[in-house]
Image: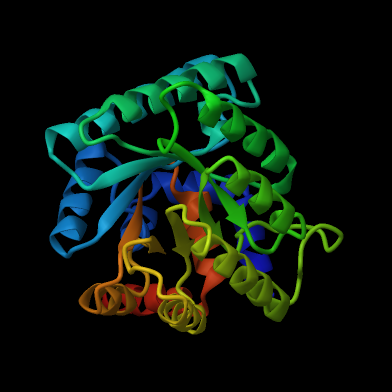
Amino acid sequence: MLRAFFVHLSENPSLRNFAERSSLGRRVSGRFVAGTEIADAVRATQAINRAGMSVSIDNLGENVTNPEEARHSAQLYQQILDAIVANQLNANISLKLTHVGLDVDERLARDIVSGLVAKSASMNPPGFVRVDMEGSPYTQRTLDFVHELHRMPGNTNSVGTVIQAYLKRSESDVAKLLAEGIRIRLCKGAYKEPAEIAFSAKSEVDANYVKLMKTLMKSGIYHGLATHDESIVRQAKAFATAEKLPRDSFEFQMLYGIRRDLQQSLVRDGWRVRIYIPFGTEWYPYFMRRLGERPANVLFIARHLLRA
């Protein structure tokens, strides 16, 4: 119920316009969004690196409406890759295909992402581009895109994607990605999807997540388990121990500003952790989806406002 409410708010253009332009909106989003500039993302990444964790940087935005916006997004990602090299950051990048023009000019989007993957692959050490997953209308297009990118010479291990455990098709998608050695970030899913294609009960989503998680962990490919669910984290650790999987054979992935205690505990115990750091002016939809995922996030913001 709460999640659906915040997903609905994330799609409200009037609220988005007000929030992204107001100083109050920017202030309360600061827990989950590093800032609006590349320099903000660099500073946040450096702090996370010092704490023993790696990072995935995302310039927030989706569904650009013209080629100029797509090219501007591409330029920002080029600058992020340059900043990673210049500052010797332990970081990669995440991007959404609609943010680089998929709905405007598919060929342009392919050229942009191909260029970013090629640049990332040529970095020293080699970088990595995570093609993020969006709502179900984009699932097949995104997967086709990633398969095509991964097959290009020099791109192996430099591009991967995301699988959402709440989609009923995900087991089949995982099998196809693993057959080509493509790295996966496994998450539960943050979009509102119809019951015909997605599990609606939390227990069903959790069960499918754990099932897919075990498949990924035993695949011999380096994957990311994106979760803040302590029960699932415990199951992953127990499975790794029982199967004698090295602790550096996969990583836990968590969101900037959420469950810092759990992040630090995992690092202390010798597990790999990567933090997803978003930045940019178009932060509102992301912020609302994060509030909908955990009631504790809403309570945190309320306390923050009361102290202000």
Name the residue at 22% across, 28% down.
Answer: 82
| Residue 203 picture quarter | bottom right
Taking the view exactly as shown, the residue that stands out farthest to the front is: 244
- Can you give x and y, in whole percent of width and height, for residue 261 in the image? 29, 79
Q: Nearer the viewer, residue 196 or 239?
A: 239
Residue 205 in the image: above or below residue 60: below
Q: Nearer the viewer, residue 269 or 241?
A: 241
| Residue 106 picture quarter | top right
- Can you give x and y, in whole percent of width and height, for residue 139 in the image? 69, 43
Q: Is residue 204 left or right of residue 284?
A: right
Residue 77 in the image: above or below residue 259: above
Name the residue at 58% across, 40% down.
Answer: 180
Q: Is residue 42 left or right of residue 114?
A: left
If the image is split into quadrants, where does the C terminus sit? Answer: bottom left
Name the residue at 52% across, 64% down.
Answer: 218
Residue 106 in the image: above or below residue 224: above
Residue 142 in the image: above or below residue 110: below
- The reply to whether residue 280 is visible in this rendering is no
Q: How many marks?
A: 0
Q: Is residue 52 left or right of residue 196?
A: left
- Can you give x and y, in whole percent of width and height, for residue 146 in the image? 57, 34
If the image is split into quadrants, where does the N terminus sit? Answer: bottom right
- Can you give x and y, in whole percent of width and height, for residue 297 in the image? 44, 74
Q: Nearer the viewer, residue 177 or 107?
A: 177
Taking the view exactly as shown, the residue that stands out farthest to the right is: 196
Q: Nearer the viewer, residue 260 or 130?
A: 130
Name the residue at 28% across, 48% down.
Answer: 35
Q: How is the image coloured?
A: rainbow
- The reply to whether residue 156 is visible in this rendering is yes
